[in-house]
Amino acid sequence: MHFTSEQRLDDGILQREFTLGEIPGTLWTPESAAPLPLILMAHNNGLPKGESRLVARARHTAASGYAVATIDAAGCGDRPRSAAEEQARADLRRAFQAGEPVDEIFESFIGPLVEKAVPDWQTALDALLALPGIGGPVGYSGWTAVGIRLAAVEPRIAAAGFFAGGYVPHAQRAEARQVTVPLLFLLQWDDEGNPRQAALDLFDAFGSKEKTLHANLGGHTGTPWFEVEDGDRFFGRHLK
């Protein structure tokens, strides 16, 4: 891991940009004399790590006493994309504009993206836990499809917070029973692009004995800020 920049923010949080081979990432840490628990934070459907809503969540969570890290995994953010990925994105834009069904396009796009992204997250996790000042346990917050696969295959994930607002491929829906860590699942009740019943069915499928569903009125980007605060309390119960 190579740190490429470092900035002490107004709230006292240290923000560091890093590269890990071809993986770019950002790490936020508060001042602390004790080793910090770590939260991996991912944005839905491969959006960039610098997206403003993710950065705001990360800074708030770091101020609550966590090391928080995000990456642009393979095919995500500004990482190079294959011709097939570019075509799938173009097909999605065309289908949305035409009001056509998009599930098959999402399946062809998001499924391979998850397969490539999860190994990058595991590589980042290895490097982050080797840093001084970060001791775990580890939580995951954000993109449901990646989170399902990561929680199913990565025993170091101790708790997870998922956002229902993103397409979940068939393979990850089948893996939901393998997710057994404590889980907080956020659902926007009026998210026009993500059918409510599909999210409720997915919540039912998770194998966790402790799982909580928070549903709020509003569209895709309308998740209330208090859910970030509730998420910090959720992770506090399981990571501290």
Image (cartoon, helix red, strand yellow):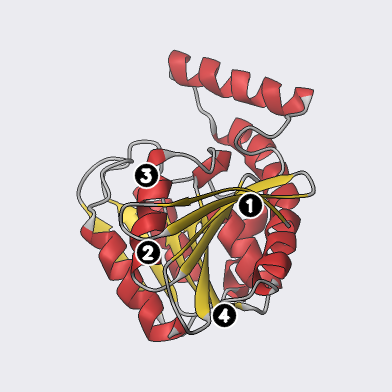
Front residue of this view, candidates 65 and 117:
65
Question: What label does residue 61 carry, if any?
Answer: 2
Distance between mark 1 and mark 3 Cα atoms: 27 Å
Q: Residue at x 39, y 74 (%)?
A: 65
Ranked by sequence position, the earlier of labels 2 and 3 is 3
> Height in image: 32 above or below 149?
below
> Height in image: 55 above or below 127?
above
- Res 83 → quadrant: top right
Mark 4 or 1: in front is 4
Relative side of 61 to 16, left or right: left
> Height in image: 104 above or below 226?
above
Give residue 23's position: percent from left, percent from top: 72, 47
Circle 3: element type: helix
Check disc 2 and give the amino acid type.
Thr
Crowding at mark 3 (Cα within 10 Å: few <14, some 14-19, many 20+): few
Instruction: Please give the residue where the numbered disc 4 appears in the rendered image.
Output: 136
